[in-house]
Amino acid sequence: MRLPVIRGMIDRRILVNFRIDPGVMSRNLPAPFRPQLVNGYAIGGICLIRLKNVRPRFSPFPWGISSENAAHRIAVEWDDKSGVRQGVYIPRRDTDSRLNTWAGGRIFPGVHHHASFTIDEGDPYFSVTMQSNDGEARVQVDGIISDRLPTSSVFSSVKDVSDFFERGSLGYSETHLKGHYDGLELQCENWHVEALEIEQVESSYFENESRFPAGSVEFDCALLMRGIDHEWHGREDLCCSRA
C-alpha cells in the first residue's frame, strides 16, 4: 500500500473477543485465509480504538489527527512462500474521521466507513457505542476493569491472551477490489493489557445469523489497552480469490 510509516498514540483500545465454531468461521473467510484456532475454537472480535497525534514519522511537528475507530477482525492463518503466516483478517473498518474515510483504500490500507461514536469513560468504567452511517454496522460495549478473565475463556490467563494478540500484529483489510487485501502491521513501542469485565456487548456483525447461526458464537473475553506509543507500517498486499 502507498503508505509512509505513521506514528501516534493509542489512547484507548478495547478488544472484545468471541469464540466461534471453526467450521462456521471457515465459511465466512475468503481465500487464502483459514481460522487460527485456540483450544479448538476460531477467534473473532471487535477492536474499538481511539488514536491521537497520528502523523507521518518524518513529520517535524509533535501533533497530528485524532479519531475513534472500530474494526471487526478474525484471527487467521494463510500460506505463502515463507510458510504458514498468522495475523488478522479485517472484513470491516469504521471511523468518525472524514479524512480516514476518504483516505482508506486510497492512501491508508483498507476501506473505512464513516460512523458516529458515543463514548462514556471514567476509570474503571468504559462504554463505547458505534453506529455506521450506512446502517450496516452497530457495536455497543460496556465494561469495567478487572484483574482476571472469565472462567469460561479459552485463554488460560491475561498474559496468555495478551501474547496471542501481540503476535497478531499483521492485518489484511477488505478493499474495493474483490480478492485484494491491503496489508498493515501495528508495531507497539510498549505493550500492556488489562482485563475488562463486560457488562453488555452487541455486534451486528457477529449477531447476524445468516453468517453465524445461533449457538456458533459466544463471548469469550475482553481487554483494555491505554497509552501505547505505536507505528503503522504498510505491508505487501494479498491478491487472491476463490476459484
Image (cartoon, rainbow, N blue to C red):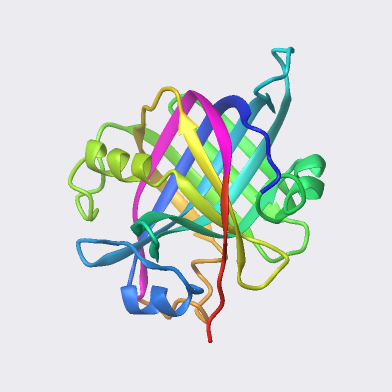
Residue 125 seen by the camera: no
Side of 14 where 64 appears, left or right: right
Highlighted magenta segment, given as a residue range: 216-234
Q: Horizontal placement of 207 versus 118: left or right? A: left
Identify the residue at horizontal 25%, vertical 48% (top origin): 150
The number of numbered badges drawn on the structure is 0
Q: Position of residue 72 (x, y in %)?
A: 54, 56
Above or below 29: residue 201:
above
Of residue 237 and residue 209, the one placed in the foreground of this image is: 237
On screen, 43 above or below 14? below
Of residues 11 and 80, the one nearer the viewer is 80
For the point 75% across and 43% down, the residue is 100
- Residue 144 appears left or right of 160: right
The residue positioned 51% from the left and 74% from the top of the image is 30
Measuring from the top left, give residue 235's x and y in whole percent. Answer: 56, 47
Predominant SS of the magenta segment: strand
Q: Residue at x 61, y 26 (%)?
A: 7
Question: Does the magenta segment cover residue 230?
Answer: yes
Is residue 97 in sight in this rendering?
yes
Name the spot of residue 240 as percent of width and height, x first: 55, 72
Q: Residue furthest bottom?
A: 243
Taking the magenta stretch, the answer to whether it contains residue 130 is no
**On the image, which quarter does residue 86 sit in?**
bottom left
User: Is 175 in front, or is 28?
Assistant: 175
- Image quadrant where residue 220 sits: bottom left
Vertical placement of residue 212 versus 44, above or below: below
Front residue (pair 122, 92) = 92
Residue 180: percent from left, percent from top: 62, 66
